[in-house]
Amino acid sequence: MTRQINQSIQGLNTLGGDCFPECSENLPQEIGSILLEVNQTLAVAESCTSGRVAARITSVPGSSAYFKGGVISYSTALKKKLLKVKKALLDHHTEVSGEVAKAMAIGVRQLTAADWAISTTGVAGPDRGVDGNPVGTLFIGVCGPGCVSAHAFQLRKMAREKFVERAVEQALAVLICALRLGS
């Protein structure tokens, strides 16, 4: 299943930074409908999106039936302490990487006992990340029954607020693809 998710997300990558803007309002409802239909739950771990993925998910009435909660792990220390991201992984791959995005998703899934988890880590700007990643770098991790994957995006250079909006849209799009394939 991970291979199918990766192929679907690969298609998203070719669309660039404005993936799904026209249907973005419906994604949280669709995510909730799928989770309710299969009686599964969701948790989030966010860095560069600062809780906005969770806010979009919980904007849907009745989301408490499937949303377990989330962690905003802006600091490295919280990634290590709450999400159990290993120091060696952070040292080798840096905070803004696919490997760390996967570890964050795994960590929040374990922390909350959710069926599905999604994570975001990236560089919103205005300057390059401390690890040298350019502004617009985004990684989204997904962890669910039988799958763990990370997806890289390079969003166009844009104002910080716009980056966060686009990162949230990308995260919701990645999650809906994973849920459709995994449910």
Image (spheres, rainbow, N blue to C red):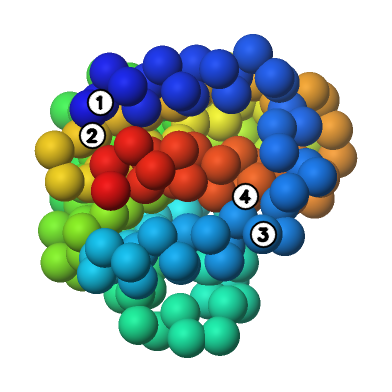
* Residue furthest to the front: 37
Q: Establish if 137 lies above or below 164.
A: above
In the image, what residue type sits under mark 1? Thr
Q: Are marks 1 and 4 in contact (CB under 8 Å)?
A: no
Give how far across and how far down residue 27 sits, in percent.
Answer: 60, 55
Mark 4–mark 2 distance (CA, rounded to whole Å): 19 Å
In the image, what residue type sits under mark 2? Val
Give how far across and how far down residue 80 sits, in percent.
Answer: 24, 50
Mark 1–mark 4 distance (CA, rounded to whole Å): 21 Å
Q: Mark 2 points at which residue?
A: 148
Mark 3–mark 4 distance (CA, rounded to whole Å): 13 Å
Q: Are marks 3 and 2 in contact (CB under 8 Å)?
A: no
Q: Which of marks 3 and 2 is nearer the N terminus?
A: 3
Near mark 3 (Cα within 10 A), the count class, few <14, some 14-19 or many ≥20, is few
Q: Mark 4 points at which residue?
A: 168
In the image, what residue type sits under mark 3? Asn
Q: Which of 47 and 7 is in front in this view?
A: 7
Q: Which of 119 and 77 is in front in this view?
A: 119
Q: Name the residue: 61% across, 77% down.
A: 59
Q: Establish if 51 lies above or below 86.
A: below
Mark 3–mark 2 distance (CA, rounded to whole Å): 25 Å
Q: Earlier in the sequence, mark 1 or mark 2?
A: 1
Near mark 4 (Cα within 10 A), the count class, few <14, some 14-19 or many ≥20, is many
Q: Choose mark 3 or mark 1, whichever is in front.
A: 3
Q: Earlier in the sequence, mark 1 or mark 4?
A: 1
Residue 85 placement, left or right of 152? left
Give how far across and how far down residue 19 sits, in percent.
Answer: 70, 32
Q: Name the residue under label 3.
A: 26
Q: Residue 82 carries which label?
A: none
Q: Name the residue: 25% across, 26% down.
A: 2
Q: Nearer the viewer, residue 104 or 109?
A: 109
Q: Name the residue: 35% across, 71% down.
A: 36
